[in-house]
Image (cartoon, rainbow, N blue to C red):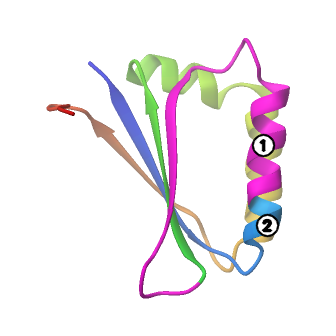
Amino acid sequence: MSFVQILEFSTKHATEVESLMNEWRTQTEGKRHVKREVVAKHHDRPDHYVALVEFSSYEEAQRNSKLPETDRFNAHMVKLCDGPIKFSDYDVIRDKS
């Protein structure tokens, strides 16, 4: 069963966050477990974002979380955000295009 993690955060440093995400993707090429990643900016709340990160399974998400590059990413991301990052975990029960 697929697994989705949703990160909800606010930042005034969107460009730096985008660079950080690109850097993490480069550093984890060939070893990350992310199937798909979508980042969305809130339509009515400036500086508010969500990132939906899809994995093949919860176990794959856990392996991804244990990468040292993910630890470094999270530590830097916290510094760029205006407040805590909210993490939510979901098992996918329906996926239609």
Give me the residue at 73% from left, 81% from top.
12
Residue pointed to by mark 1: 22
Magenta range is 18-46
Residue pointed to by mark 2: 15
Left or right position of 39 against 91: right
**Mark 1 falls on what kind of element?**
helix
Q: Nearer the viewer, residue 87 or 36?
A: 36
Quadrant in the rendering for residue 85: bottom right
Amino acid type for the residue under numbered disc 2 = Thr
Amino acid type for the residue under numbered disc 1 = Asn
Q: Are marks 2 and 1 in contact (CB under 8 Å)?
A: no
Task: Look at the picture and state if 43 lies above or below 31.
Answer: below
Q: Residues within 10 Å of mark 2 (few under 14, many from 20)?
A: few
Quadrant in the rendering for residue 54: top left
Report, in whole angstroms, how far the alpha carbon at label 2 lies from the one at label 1: 11 Å
Instruction: Specify whether residue 19 is painted magenta.
Output: yes
**Residue 26: horizontal and vertical position, in percent?**
82, 29
**Residue 4: horizontal and vertical position, in percent?**
38, 37
Tell me the quadrant of the picture where the C terminus can be found. top left
